Structures are given as structure tokens and as C-alpha cells.
Image (tube, grey):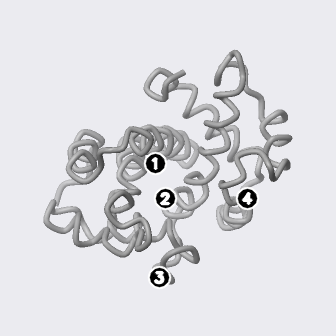
Amino acid sequence: MAKLTLEQAKTILKKHTTEEHLFTHAAAVSAAMGAMAEHFGEDQEYWEAVGYLHDVDYEKYPDEHCKHVREFLEPERIDDETIETIISHGWGLCVDEPEPTTPIAKSLFTVDELTGIVQAYGLMRPEGLDGMSVKSLKKKFKDKKFAAKCDREVIKKGFAMLGMEAADVMECVIKGMQAHKAELGF
């Protein structure tokens, strides 16, 4: 099986998703994952593709999220390692297994929620994502009322799993999303 590409991920997601905000979220997570891949010296397109496809079953099964990923992706000939990585982003939230253990899985677990905070902060700033600093993002991160649906405990758990400082992950996410700002509506 060939490695998942971003083009393939976009084609697959279109088969299972119609809501525009889910495509925007997919693009944000994809952008963040590309920056995380760069940080780890990994395959950027593959990580972006995994990020783009991570919520493939969410629209159809919001209450059973991550439990239908395999049935959507096996017919597309997506390899088991990629499927497990995608499922693992719901670890402790909607699935008990598999636990994220690889840099890509830990990154996906962490940036999924964090991109929501970055996106919300960018939308309220006149400059959008341009010039966004880690210091100002950290202030928004500490304000639990801001982007309240983004689970900060999950994000903090992700920082610890990655063995990275919050500021370093935030910098990657901001950088990745800035590089794709047009696609994200900025």
C-alpha cells in the first residue's frame, strides 16, 4: 500500500463530510501537522494528510467518533498504521485504544484541540494569524472562557506526551496555520 497523500485524504473526506466548518478544521489540523512533521524531521505531506483525514467519521457519527474510522478507511486501502494513528487522536475521549505512542499520533492528539484555540484567536484579531505570538496565544490558552469547547487538559496531556514545552508546540501550530492562512479563511 502506498502512503496516504494529501490529495487522497481530501478526496476521501469529501465522501463522508459536507459541513464547511469540518473542512476548515481539517485544513487547520493538516497545517499544524505539517509544521509538527517539520519539527520532527518527518514526511510533511503524509502528516498533513493524516491531519486532514482525522475526523473522517465525525459528521456521520459524532457520538461514536473514532469508532467508525476503520470501516471508512479500509475500503480506501489505507494502511493499518495510518488508521490506528487517526483513531488514537480520540484516546481517553471517545476511544480507550489505541493510545498515541508515536510522534505523529501524539502530535495529532495534541494539535486537534489546540488548532481550535489558534483559529478562534485569529478570527478575533484584526490581523488574523499574521503576527500572532506565542506569548499572546498563551494568555488566551489560560483564559478558560475563551474557546471554551477546546479541552485544555487534553492539550496539556499532549504537551507532556510529546515531551515538548507548550510554547514550542504553539509555535509550530501558529507557523503551520500561518502558512495556510488563505485556505483557513484568513
Above or below, 78 against 35 in this view is: below
**Coordinates of residue 122 in the picture (x, y in percent):** 66, 29
- Residue 93 screen position, x and y as percent: 56, 73
Which residue, given by chain and number where applicable, does mark 2 sit on? 104
The residue located at (58%, 44%) in the rendering is 39
| C-alpha gap between disc 4 and disc 2 | 20 Å
Mark nearest the camera among 3 and 4 is 4
Q: Which residue is mark 4?
A: 152
Q: Nearer the viewer, residue 64 or 174?
A: 64
Q: Are marks 3 and 4 in contact (CB under 8 Å)?
A: no
Q: Which residue is mark 3?
A: 97
Please identify, in this view, whether the residue under mark 4 or under mark 1 is nearer the observer: 4
Q: Nearer the viewer, residue 124 or 115?
A: 124
- Of the image marks 4 and 1, the number of the one nearer the N terminus: 1
Q: Amino acid at mark 1?
A: Glu
In the image: residue 106, left or right of residue 121: left
Q: Are marks 2 and 1 in contact (CB under 8 Å)?
A: yes
Look at 46% across and 79% down and name the residue there: 98
Neighbourhood count class around disc 3 (C-alpha, 10 Å): few under 14, some 14–19, many 20 upward = few
Q: Mark 3–mark 2 contact, CB under 8 Å?
A: no
Which amino acid, by three-letter code, is at mark 4? Arg
Q: Earlier in the sequence, mark 3 or mark 2?
A: 3
Element carrying mark 1 = loop
Q: Secondary structure at mark 4?
A: helix
Which of the labelled discs sits on residue 42, or is there none? 1
Q: Residues within 10 Å of mark 1 (few under 14, many from 20)?
A: some
